[in-house]
Image (tube, rainbow, N blue to C red):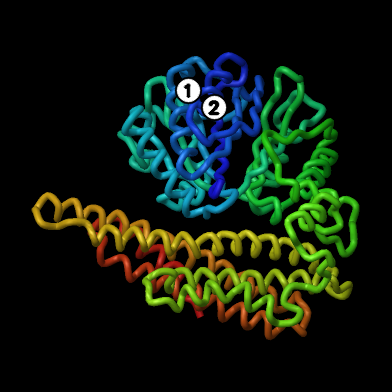
Amino acid sequence: MQTLIECIPNFSEGRDSAVVEALVRALLAGPDVYLLDREMDADHNRSVITIVGTAESIGKAALRGIAEAAELIDLNHHQGAHPRLGSTDVVPFVPLAGVTLADCVRIAEWVAEETWNRLRIPTYLYEAAAHRPERVNLENIRRGQFEGVREEIATNPERLPDFGEAALHPTAGATVVGARKFLIAYNINLNTSDATPARAIAKKIRASSGGFPCVKAMGVELKGRNLAQVSMNLTDFETTSIATVFDAVSREATKLGFEVVGSEIVGLVPRQALVNTAVQYLRVEQFRPELIVENRLEQVLAGGDSKLETKKPGASGAPLRNMVESFVTAVADPTPTPGGGSVAALAGALAASLGEMVCGTSLKRKSLEEHHASLEAARARLAAWRQHLMDNIDRDAESYGAVLAAFKLPKATEAEQAARLDAVEAASKKASQTPLETAEHAASVEREIAGLAGITITQAASDLRVAHDLAVAARQGGIENVRANLPAVHDTTWRQEIEARLKKIGNRE
């Protein structure tokens, strides 16, 4: 296969194996789609099915699964520990090979629109596919669940779907579709049937409450096992590892007088995530992937150099240049994208990475031990912003490409002119959103860098200054790219909201 995309639909049924089997059959009914894993959880009353397919086949497979779930699952009769909004609750697409996250965004948007057009099930877009910043996080969309959203959607414009009308499907609810990086669903069980401590621990560790970056968590009761569970999604295991959250949950449980009795991974997990966990626990010094025999065999069998490379990339100068030259060349090409928005996002990511480096270097100094906790927290926040800004490099180019496509629509008749104006406005809104997020993330990086000056090694002062200046450039560059798209938007309310956010981040020195 030249392209490979993973899709992990979550269905609101985890007790009836016949229903789950029917869902699997529907997903696999077309060509070039393969089953990797299926998980059923009776307490959550939820199944997670992992399939993989080509870019041409995977969206159609997801639609078949959504249609089958709408026929077989009635949310009016569904109960379980896990929050849910639809019979097909969430459908993420993950790039594996030969595709980018932006490609997965396009597939997610197509699936979301077709789900409404064909099945009349309203849909929301989340993560990298989100059209609104507050919908990046799934929990914001699903808040209130099926029953709460069903009541609120008719009167609250904030709950309107991205595709569909102001009403949920009477039995299938709504479906959330998106694109994201690899996510690890990881649960830790406690020796109590009371979910209260699990909820307290979840609140302590999740990113939205000020805990670890890239961690989503909630506490639930597993009635069938007489246990409480801290149920988590790790959205970037390289930023916050399995070992990190396991240690944190164990510590917090001990403080509350409970113990961890086990943990589980739902669905599939990248090999590197388990490797990172083992290395972290064993405190392996100077570890590199080639020390794993399977990795080394794959390298040799693929025709790689038989000598292990031990130098840091860039040690001789040439490798680092090779790493960045393709992007720089693409920017130099006489095409609109990648342009200023992508460059601004890269500048912000570089600022964050410099800050991470300074934090990491300073953590090695015993003389700064009193600041180690603050440095660890700052490094984690910078890592999360770096990832968001890196994602925006592609997202900015893709969104502006949609603006160019809208301007090329026919305009011979009045109807065509009206449709073209609507398309240009919608595309311009989306093209404004990504650089706005870039500016906001860059402003956060700028503040974080400023706070490192007194708690890091003095030898890194020049690095912090470079990071600061890059963050300022990224913030200003993001703002300029937002303003470049605003003239095509005639929605006064929307523009006022954007102007308010620009004002909040624009007045910095």
Q: Is residue 204 above or below residue 343?
A: above
Position of 3 compared to 332: left or right?
Answer: right
Residue 65 image position (x, y, % from top left): 48, 27
Residue 307 shows in this picture: yes
Q: Going from the N terminus, do you reach mark 1 or mark 2 first?
A: 2
Given residues 274 and 159, the one toward you in this image is 274
Q: Are circles 1 and 2 on residues that touch, CB within 8 Å?
A: yes
Tell me the element at label 2: strand
Residue 211 shows in this picture: no
Quadrant in the picture for the N terminus: top right
Q: Residue at x 53, y 60 (%)?
A: 391
Q: Residue at x 76, y 24 (%)?
A: 227
Q: Is residue 444 above or below residue 37?
A: below
Quarter of the figure with residue 434: bottom left
Given residues 199 and 298, the one toward you in this image is 298
Position of 464 compared to 441: left or right?
Answer: right
Quarter of the figure with residue 60: top left
Given residues 309 and 302, the one toward you in this image is 302
Question: Could you say which disc has been placed on residue 474 in the image?
Answer: none
Given residues 68 and 33, the one toward you in this image is 33
Q: Residue at x 14, y 55 (%)?
A: 417
Residue 149 image position (x, y, % from top left): 42, 31
* Circle 2 residue: 11
Tell me the element at label 1: helix
Q: Residue at x 85, y 53 (%)?
A: 292
Q: CA distance from mark 1 to mark 2?
A: 7 Å
Position of 420 compared to 223: left or right?
Answer: left
Q: Is residue 29 above or below residue 461?
A: above
Question: Could you say which disc has been placed on residue 69 in the image?
Answer: 1
Three-letter amino acid code at the position of disc 2: Phe
Three-letter amino acid code at the position of disc 1: Ala
